[in-house]
Image (cartoon, rainbow, N blue to C red):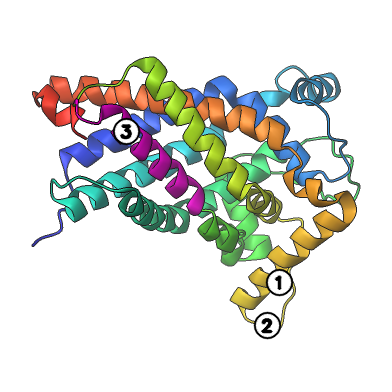
């Protein structure tokens, strides 16, 4: 049995997922800016998302909530293209037309997530740096950066910190493949439940709601690790040297989590969760809605039967 890596169906899913995610992120981008500031700047007081955004606009200008939009969109487009392509390609080759199950969706989601992390982490490291560049931090220990763009950021990071710095935060990112894996498991599971016995195309409201529920559950479970991931990508935390990379990364994750709890209590692990939930749930819900509609329309244009799409 051959493993078909390239297929038009997987390509349609990948392009639809990339376009849907880019559009949704653009709409809700300021919410992601508020979330990132709360995760990285420990001295910034926790406020409501509108209050954080109002402070950012007041201190840094009207366009500050959209700072770093281009690198984030480039990273997100590449990341979602890779994830959706891998997920649906692996799923099609594994199931061979059989009905999927939650455990299958979870395993395939983890595998697709690992491939995605290893390929796109450098893009996310660069976009985190660019997005926070020029920000007014409450924490005086944070060093300013001066990158003129994506390519210059790559160049400076490699020159000053080494090629390995482009994969900062890879270990928590690998652990965080559980986030999209859980999200897709819940999403596909709810979709199967709604279609049970009656193959049909879900309504826009149904897709939006199950997309929101799936992302909310995945985000709450994995949020503390997302905070560690953001700090490591920002490159302002000095990892210990003289021991293996794996042990150093595990020690760093433990240290960051413990320091967060000591400083702010257990709730400190979830600092910025309100902004993250607001941003990520709305973004994921809109992304899944656009993804389903684009995929459906594309399959119809390609001449595939409606039954083929409804049974996915």
Using a 10 Å C-alpha cutoff, classify the residue at mark 1 as few (fewer than 14 neighbours), some (14 to 19) or many (20 or more). some
Residue lying at 34% horizontally and 38% vertically, measured from the top left: 188
The mark that comes first in sequence, 2 or 1, is: 2
Q: Does dot 3 land on a helix, a strand or a loop?
A: helix
Identify the magenta region: 178-198
Query: Is 255 left, or right, of 188 in this rendering?
Result: right
Alpha carbon separation for disc pair 1 and 3: 42 Å
Is label 1 in a helix, a strand or a loop? Answer: helix
The dot on residue 243 is 2
Asked if residue 277 lies left or right of residue 295, the reply is right
Q: Which residue is nearer to you in this view: 100 or 7?
A: 100
| In the depicted structure, whether residue 36 falls above or below residue 310 | below
Q: CA distance from mark 2 to mark 1?
A: 10 Å
- Work out whether residue 271 or residue 125 is closer to the camera in this orientation and state it: 271
Question: Is disc 2 in contact with disc 1, using a CB cutoff of under 8 Å?
Answer: yes
Q: Which quarter of the image is occupied by the C terminus?
A: top left
Mark 3 lies on residue = 193
Kindly indicate whether the residue at mark 2 contacts the one at mark 3 (C-beta within 8 angstroms). Answer: no
Dot 1 or dot 3, earlier in sequence: 3
Assign the magenta stretch its main secondary structure. helix
Residue 74 in sight here: no
In the image, residue 259 above or below residue 271: below
Residue at 8% across, 62% down: 1
Residue bearing the label numbered 1: 251
């Amino acid at each position: 049995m051959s493993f078909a890596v390239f297929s038009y169906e997987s390509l349609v899913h990948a392009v639809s997922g990339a376009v849907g995610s880019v559009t949704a992120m653009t709409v809700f981008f300021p919410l992601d800016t508020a979330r990132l500031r709360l995760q990285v700047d420990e001295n910034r007081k926790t406020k409501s998302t509108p209050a954080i955004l109002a402070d950012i606009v007041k201190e840094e200008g009207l366009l500050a909530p959209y700072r770093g939009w281009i690198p984030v969109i480039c990273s997100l487009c590449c990341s979602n293209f890779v994830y959706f392509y891998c997920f649906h390609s692996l799923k099609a080759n594994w199931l061979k037309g059989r009905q999927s199950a939650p455990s299958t969706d979870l395993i395939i989601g983890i595998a697709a997530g690992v491939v995605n992390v290893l390929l796109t982490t450098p893009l996310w490291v660069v976009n985190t740096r660019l997005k926070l560049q020029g920000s007014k931090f409450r924490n005086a220990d944070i060093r300013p950066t001066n990158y003129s763009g994506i390519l210059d950021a790559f160049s400076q990071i490699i020159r000053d910190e080494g090629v390995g710095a482009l994969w900062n935060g890879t270990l928590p990112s690998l652990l965080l493949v559980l986030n999209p894996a859980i999200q897709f498991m819940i999403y596909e599971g709810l979709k199967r439940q709604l279609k049970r016995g009656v193959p049909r195309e879900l309504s826009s409201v149904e897709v939006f709601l199950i997309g929101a529920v799936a992302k909310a559950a995945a985000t709450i479970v994995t949020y503390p690790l997302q905070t560690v991931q953001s700090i490591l990508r920002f490159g302002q935390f000095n990892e210990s040297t003289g021991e293996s990379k794996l042990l150093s990364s595990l020690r760093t994750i433990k240290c960051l989590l413990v320091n967060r709890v000591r400083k702010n209590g257990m709730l400190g692990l979830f600092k910025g969760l309100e902004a993250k939930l607001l941003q990520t749930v709305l973004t994921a819900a809109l992304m899944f809605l656009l993804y389903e509609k684009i995929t459906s329309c594309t399959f119809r244009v390609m001449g595939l039967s409606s039954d083929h799409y409804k049974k996915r």
